[in-house]
Amino acid sequence: MTAPQEAAPTTAWAWDARRLAQLGVLTFARFLQNTLLRMVYPFAPAFARGLGVPVATIYLIVSLRNLLGLSSPLLAHLPERHGRRVVMSLTLLIFGVASLLVVGLPVVWTLGLAIIVAGVLKVIFDPAMQSYLGDVVPYHQRGKALSVTEFAWSGAFLVGAPLTGWLIANQGWPAPFLWLGVGGLVAAIFLWRVLPPAGKPRGRAVGAANTWQALRQHPVIWAAALYMMLALVAQETLFIVYGDWMESTFSLSLTSLGLATTLIGLAEMGGEATAGWSVDRFGKRPVVILCGLLNAAIFLIIPLSTGSLVSAMTVMIALFFTFEIAIVGAIPLLTELVPSERVVVMSMGLGAMAAGRTIGSIIGPFVWARAGMTGNSAISAVMMLLAVLVLARWLREGKEAIHE
């Protein structure tokens, strides 16, 4: 059975000012959410010192946030029932309020609440956004459109991390939450005004029972979820201890750590741009498989790079560059696995990513305390290799099921 290829549809996505404005608003909204989620990693020690709690407390909050991200498939009905734009705007309003709460009451439970709420909101917002673009952007152009919104992921490190480091160092640990909260409220207003609805809400029952029915009818969704989960276990197992590793190995200040993280953001942005260009031209699967294999190999090199900051950052840049292509390149592939159940597929993917982050955030500190970066890197390499094998074996565009 041959899968549909990259044939151009009769109508094309117009890259005009209106479309670019819509992508810009979506990207900015994701940038704010991703910054809150990602700044915890390099600055976990700084948050812990500011609150007077062990850094393990921050890791526990991250693990709980990731665990609640498993609710994504249960929340898949929200965009279908109420409309993508309504759900995305509401999540941004809640995000803004939760962030500003930290500024008004800077204690450990408000920090934990903001981090956890942001994690849950992300698994609602992202499938709604990706499904929206899946509805309105032709498949042969979808890689480019989705990769633009993925700049929000790298931007969280490229812009968000150094700004966060500077604000914490000069104004205290709650300072980043002020601009995140205000930005969230502004983004909600702009998204509602700029983004037209892709269609009327379905208004039918699309809750857990319908999600389970789709999973039974289309086993390929399980394979897609497994790929995302394994890949995120690989990343999180290493990344959860990234800030601790950089501080303890190279004695970096908060500002220096923010600048080092900016380099990783540049690498991710390069990976996102490369994914957007390459997967539409050379095919989603070949590009993702190649970069996934390279990424697994680079994981193994990390323990050999601790001799100097330059060598460590070079390897980390290569690591995040290839990882970003392996993930971003897979997203448009996932949007076309079962077009009739697009929100279910993307919600399962987000839930699987949350599961991967949960597993990695538990494994990472445990292995770090006992085997150091060598242990973390080895586990990450194995997980990434398994992810590539799953994708190569089972994931094809347009297949409605896994065929033996």
Image (spheres, rainbow, N blue to C red):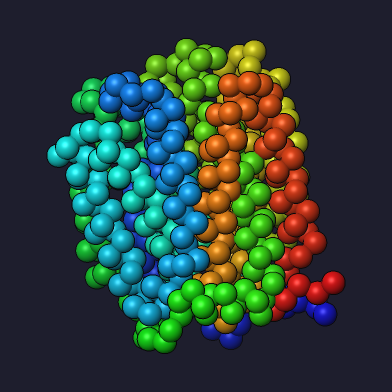
Residue ID at (54%, 83%): 11
Is residue 299 at least partly visible in the picture?
yes
Horizontal and vertical percent position of residue 335: 58, 70
Horizontal and vertical percent position of residue 318: 64, 35
**On the picture, is 151 further left or further right than 4?**
left
Which of 123/209 is in front? Answer: 209
Horizontal and vertical percent position of residue 217: 66, 80
Residue ID at (80%, 78%): 2
Count of number-bearing discs:
0
**On the picture, is 27 further left or further right than 378?**
left
Q: Residue extending furthest left?
A: 104
Residue ID at (58%, 32%): 364
Placement of the C terminus among the 4 image quadrants: bottom right
Is residue 328 at least partly visible in the picture?
no
**On the picture, is 68 further left or further right than 309?**
left
Q: Is residue 260 above or below residue 87?
A: above
Horizontal and vertical percent position of residue 134: 51, 73
Which of 375/247 is in front? Answer: 375
Q: Is residue 101 above or below residue 209?
A: above
Location of residue 362 by image quarter: top right
Location of residue 305 by image quarter: top right
Location of residue 238 by image quarter: top right
Placement of the N terminus among the 4 image quadrants: bottom right
